[in-house]
Image (cartoon, helix red, strand yellow):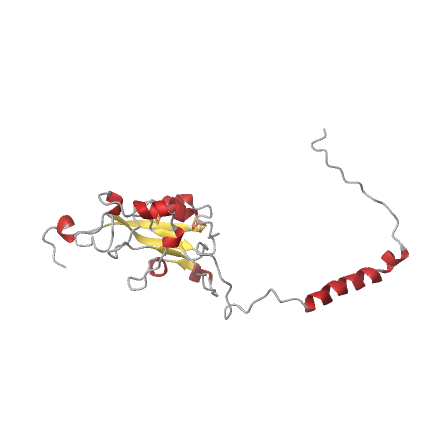
């Protein structure tokens, strides 16, 4: 049965003398090599030199905090389910009284790990997250010598309270506008008086 109309005519033409001694082919190859000597080198001296990368480059992940510094992740597992590389694992914890300033939701990620050797930086975890808790960033994952160094836990993933990472360039104007709509549960921030009447910090 003929599947396509494509045909290739195979030539069994005898090789000429020049083709049999290979010299013209070798000379042609050397000319191509020589021509590259006068071209600008495409290689750079990384890590001293770095190429500019896009704002939406998919590099090392960050687990975001909200405006008050509480962790946004609610350990729902959507990112882990979406991950085609099965790189994400987590365990959940239940927020205790007085921890509202630490965790935004009643349930939080007690542990959260991404195996960077499995990750293919596809960004599906970022797309799946309903809490805008996980984003990829323009940071490149550091090199290492041991496999275990590449299992990143919360210590490496959660953004530092005094070194916040701006991810607004990764979000559409619609999402950014949605985050500012007052009255939505999604946008509610920790309010000590409302959530924990009488609790003193
Ligand atoms: S970027 Fe892709 S592969 Fe990496 S953790 Fe997220 S979903 Fe998994
Ligand atoms: S990062 Fe987002 S999707 Fe993943 S567990 Fe946390 S809240 Fe859910």
Residue 157 position in % (x across, y down) = 36, 58
**Where in the figure is residue 28, as x and y percent of width and height?**
78, 61
**Identity of the residue drawn at 13% across and 51% down:** 193
Of residues 37 and 89, the one drawn nearer to the viewer in this rendering: 37
Left or right: 118 with respect to 182?
right
Quarter of the image where one finds residue 33: bottom right
Report if residue 77 is visible in the image: no
Along the line of sight, the residue nearer the viewer: 199 or 146: 199
Q: Is residue 11 above or below residue 55?
A: above
Residue with the most extreme top position: 1
Would residue 155 be found to the left or right of residue 10 on screen?
left
Q: Is residue 198 visible?
A: yes
Farthest residue to the bottom: give it: 48
How many badges with numbers are in the image?
Answer: 0
Q: Residue at x 9, y 53 (%)?
A: 198
Furthest residue to the right? Answer: 17
Q: Where in the figure is residue 71, as x and y percent of width and height?
A: 28, 54
Q: Is residue 185 above or below residue 22?
A: above
Residue 38 locus on image (x, y percent): 68, 68
The C terminus lies in which quarter of the figure? bottom left
The quarter of the picture where the N terminus appears is top right
Note whether 35 is above or below 71 in the view shown.
below
- In screen coordinates, is 107 left or right of 138? left
Residue visible at 49% across and 62% down?
52
Question: In terms of depth relative to the viewer, which is nearer, 20 or 93?
Answer: 20
The residue lying furthest to the left in this view is 198
């Amino acid at each position: 049965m003929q599947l396509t109309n494509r045909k290739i005519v195979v030539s069994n033409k005898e090789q000429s003398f020049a083709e049999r001694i290979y010299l013209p082919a070798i000379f042609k190859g050397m000319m191509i090599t020589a021509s590259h000597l006068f071209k600008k080198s495409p290689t750079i001296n990384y890590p001293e030199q770095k190429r500019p990368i896009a704002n939406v480059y998919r590099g090392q992940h960050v687990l975001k905090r909200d405006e008050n510094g509480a962790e946004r992740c609610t350990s729902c597992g959507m990112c882990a389910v979406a991950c085609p590389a099965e790189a994400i694992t987590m365990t959940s914890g239940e927020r205790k009284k007085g921890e509202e300033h630490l965790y935004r939701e009643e349930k939080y990620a007690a542990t959260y790990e991404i195996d960077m050797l499995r990750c293919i930086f596809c960004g599906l975890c970022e797309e799946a997250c309903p809490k805008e808790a996980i984003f990829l960033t323009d940071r490149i994952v550091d090199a290492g010598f041991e496999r275990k160094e590449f299992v990143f836990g919360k210590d490496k993933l959660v953004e530092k309270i005094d070194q916040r990472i701006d991810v607004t360039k990764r979000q559409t104007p619609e999402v950014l506008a949605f985050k500012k709509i007052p009255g939505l549960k999604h946008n509610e921030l920790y309010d000590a008086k409302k959530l924990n009447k009488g609790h003193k910090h």
